[in-house]
Image (cartoon, grey):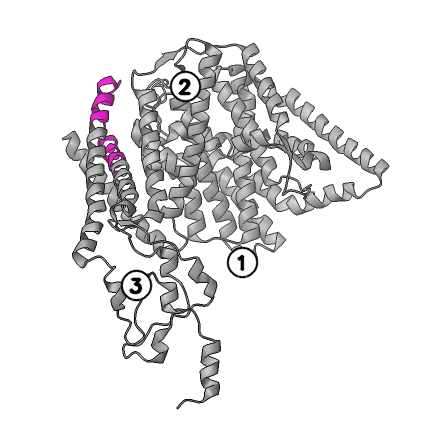
Amino acid sequence: GKAPWRRRTRAATTPTVWSELSPPSRRRSRAGYRPVAADAASSPPRDASKGMALLPHLACVAAASGALAAYRFLLIWMGSISEYTDYTAAQLGVAVAYGLAIAAWFGVEVGVFLSPRLGYGGVPSSEDAGLKGIKVASESGGEDASVLTTEDESSRDSISPPEPVIFGIRSSGLAALRAAAEFSAIMGYVYLCDRTTLFAKGPKTVSPTMFWGLCAAVLTVGLCTLRLAGKKGEVVTAPLQRDQTEEWKGWMQLQFIFYHYFAEGEIYNAIRLYIAAYVWMTGFGNFSYYYIRKDFTLPRFMQMMWRLNFFVAFVCVTMNNEYMLYYIAAMHTFFTWGVFFTCWIGHQYNDNNAVCLLKIAAATGVTVLLYDVPGVFHAVFKPTAGLLGFHDPLHPEFTDSLHEWFFRSGLDHFVWIFGMLCAYSFPWYDRQLQAIEDMPSGKRALAKAAVIGSALAVGGWYVHTYFLRPKREYNKVHPYTSWIPIAVFLVLRNATAGLRARYMHLFTWCGKVTLETYILQFHIWMKSTGINGSPKFLMVWLPSFWLNMAVVSAVYFVLSYRVFKITVVLRDVAVPKDNRGIFVNSVIMAVATAAFYAVGVALKG
């Protein structure tokens, strides 16, 4: 009774049929979407399905219980060889948290592994559950109820098998649990290395020859990893591209940790400059981001705070150390806040040169007031003494708990502003370099020679006038002069297109994990003097100095890289990209922190 043209149109455009999209056990009739009788017999009984779903959950509970039992015996053994027996409530609470993380991961891992093998198919994967374009059939049936449409018929070929779910955790969500469990194991290893007698400790070998020989060897290897910046087939000659700044961080970090390993106090002034360069990058990088992206959202800021403080927070709690022992994290956090507020206040006018420069000048004025006017610094930071205070067991004569924070941050309290100025001036700098490259070859060579010669002259003057001063004399002028060698390095490193287009990959890789290598050097590469202690000893596994250093260093760098990757994975889970999600997760983490601390208090009893 229907018009032939209408029937032909429907036949020509009939989309994917339900029976084609679904496995036999889920096909339904045209009349009411009820299971087809022929397929119903192949479906497992309801009670059997429940049993299949229950078995993986029981396996999960059993595996988690076994992991907790093993973890308890491990803690007892570690306690028997620990150099400290008076644990804080925070240490006990975080130890419980580590155990639960490992048990949860192992239990869910076992449950997910056994689910398909025990006949439990799980639920549709999160991707398949969200397929768009599906027409839900009406309860009354009819011709339109016989089809399941999709936006693209090819989607039927990409549907994944059902996804196992154990106690609400999908198999696709295991990445976060794995990261948390691995992080817990690493923290246990950190404590085992530096707070127990399992690994021997030995004196440092003070040898300038060995120190500089190792630096030369590492530089040689670094030169062998020379690469072109940019993607394949693309030559990037812009100054200060990301690979170059990571390279800069990397070689400075290697010399920084070698300085500690060999107790090479003679290069103290150079180490001060390296730290100033790190702080300069905080100003340069953050100002560049805010100035170009104009992204002042809470998620981006919180992700940065997570990156800077997640690892150090857990190390402080686990090792019962104060935050200021790892002062680099505190400095980067503080100066990141400084850049953020400088850019955020009146950010709608950041494109106005006068306003932008006025804000940088205002930040300079606030910095002068905070650090160079007596009494202001302590009045401002006195409420934060519980977090930023430090009690150095090696220097009990410092009775002012804020002394360390004032000294460390004060040494570099201006250079982050110079970093912002460099970021603001970057387009001009890039144009000048390009103008030189566009000159005829003769003029270009003369211009580059003049730039390089001028930079070397300024650098020589700085070395003679300031750099060669004794340690204490140098510290007095460092806050006001550290920008000079940084500017000289920037000019020399970017003087030619060939230098700008190349970087050493070894140092670039090391530059990505500077925070992790800085923190872990205290505890798994060397051994500290104890609570709030500096790394004054070497960790000794083997009698041969160089072989021992090679083996311990391999573990040290691998774990540094793993902590870096874990931090990123857990950041993406803990700090979502919406404000509501951040608020909810913040409440959950606050409640969990309070709960584990309460457990620690109860255990300490």
Residue at x 64% of width, y 42% of height: 232
Q: Which residue is mark 3?
A: 26
Q: Is residue 270 left or right of residue 443?
A: left
Q: Nearer the viewer, mark 3 or mark 1?
A: 3
Q: Name the quadrant of the N terminus.
A: bottom left
Counting residues from the start of the chain, the first of labels 3 and 2 encountered is 3
The span from disc 2 to disc 1 (Cα, nearest Å) is 49 Å
Magenta region includes residue 3: no
Check residue 348 in the rendering and tell me which mark sits there, or answer none.
Answer: 1
Q: Which residues are magenta?
A: 73-100
Check residue 176 in the rendering and tell me which mark sits there, or answer none.
Answer: none
Q: Which residue is mark 2?
A: 526
Q: Position of residue 512 (x, y in %)?
A: 51, 35
Q: Position of residue 311 (x, y in %)?
A: 38, 35
**Does dot 2 land on a helix, a strand or a loop?**
strand
How crowded is the residue under tag 3: few (<14 C-alpha within 10 Å), some, or many (20+)?
Answer: some
How many discs mark residues in the rendered view?
3
Of residues 453 and 143, the one nearer the viewer is 143
Residue at x 53% of width, y 18% of height: 471
Locate residue 251: give its quadrant.
top right
Q: Is residue 112 visible?
A: yes
Counting residues from the start of the chain, the first of labels 2 and 1 encountered is 1
Locate residue 522: give its quadrant.
top left
**Does dot 1 land on a helix, a strand or a loop?**
helix
Q: Position of residue 570 (x, y in %)?
A: 37, 43
The span from disc 3 to disc 2 (Cα, nearest Å) is 61 Å
How crowded is the residue under tag 2: few (<14 C-alpha within 10 Å), some, or many (20+)?
Answer: many
- Above or below, 206 relative to 446: above
